[in-house]
Image: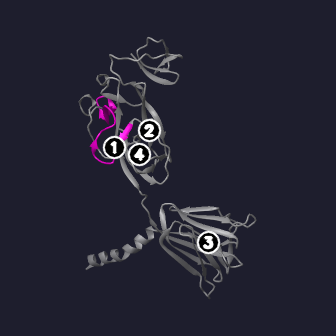
Amino acid sequence: MTKKFIVLFLLLLLPVMIWAQNSVTFDFSSSSPYDVVPTVMEKDGVYLKFSATKADVTQPNYTRVNNLKCLKIDVEGILTIESFNSKITSIKFTLADNKDDLKFYLEEVGKIGKRTISQLNRNIVERKWNGECTKVSFTPCSTGGLHIKTIQISYEKVQPKGVSLAVSSAERATLYYSDRSFIIPEGIVARTYKIEGNVLSRSREYKKGDVLPKGTAVVLEAKEGKYIFEETSKTGETDPHNALCGSDSTTITSGGEVYYVFGKGSNGVGFYWKEANGKAFTTEAHKAYLVYTPSKTTNAKSFLGFDVALEIQGPMVREKITFDGPIYNLAGQRVDKDYKGIIIVNGKKYLNR
């Protein structure tokens, strides 16, 4: 009997617990008139912002009305309630003066309304929007302004529309969507690669907050973990030199003569042949692959790494490197043109053999 009672109690409590997780209260009933009201307040991702329609309007201040501590907003003042990751479902005001009036403006749908609460002992007013807004503004209607004891905001969390992508311990991944642009999340760097003069090198870089344009195949660099790429209507800047390609479905690679798949192998993380001699292979949906058309396919290398500009042609065919500046090795020591290995000339890396 005791177990049944506990289960029933938890079931009855559950809706309250869920409601509490989606509600936040700003309480001004214990404020001091000597405290300065900040122009922005925040709790759990919900913001209160104070502004005015005129430059000379007094900013909100803490005061007493009817022997109750409260926050006062003058007639020309504006209170904006906003949440960037949630939909506001209702806002409840508890007022210190039951003669106060206020009106609201709902930005998303252009609604304007007025709520009169001057009835006797009417100190609580609540307005519901069924989750159709993320930003609501209020202005006082009564000549004495608006006197607020508490504001309770209820909201629904909104999952951003986007793509979840896991980065492995290799700390690299690839991404491609032909019809969707994304905002680069924190902790991610996305790069395109180009092939010029038979050398693979970085082309363009997209960092946190940048727009990754649709139809842009990229290599992602990040610590191991899961990342959300939020979809956006912004177009972003494409890279016309990008040698990376992709597909929205499982298909055969196309567009060149030699093809590389991204992965981690005996040479580390980079692009490898998946089929003999770099022939076309079946690529996975939304993954990037590298396309190359060498002067001689027999000289194409089977592996291309990152972070160092590498010649794509084989060891029997070598392009002449013109050294028009001092030459250094990776240790920063100056060397001559006969030095073998990775060298740095004018800030660029080369493989000198």
Q: Along the polypeptide, which appears first: circle 1 or circle 2?
A: 2
- Which residue is nearer to you in this view: 114 or 334? 114
Distance from the alpha carbon under mark 1 to that under mark 3 = 48 Å
Provide the secondary structure element on which disc 1 rests: loop
Residue assigned mark 1:
287
* Foreground label between 4 and 3: 4
Name the residue tied to disc 2.
191
The C terminus - image quarter: top left
- Our reading of the magenta stretch's main secondary structure is strand
The magenta-colored residue range is 244-271
Query: Of circles 1 and 3, which is in front?
Result: 1
Amino acid type indicated by mark 4: Gly
Task: Identify the residue at horizontal 53%, vertical 16% (top origin).
Answer: 324
Give the Cα separation between the discs numbered 4 and 3.
43 Å
Q: Say which amino acid is labelled 3.
A: Phe
Identify the mark nearer the N-term, 2 or 3.
Answer: 3
Separation of marks 4 and 1 at Cα, in angstroms: 12 Å
Q: Secondary structure at mark 3?
A: strand
Q: Is residue 334 left or right of residue 306?
A: right
Query: Residue at the spot x=50%, y=44% of the render?
Result: 237
SS type, badge 2: strand
Which residue is denoted by mark 3 in the rendering?
A: 138
Q: Does dot 4 land on a helix, a strand or a loop?
A: loop
Q: Residue furthest bottom?
A: 120
From the image, tell me which residue sits under label 4: 215
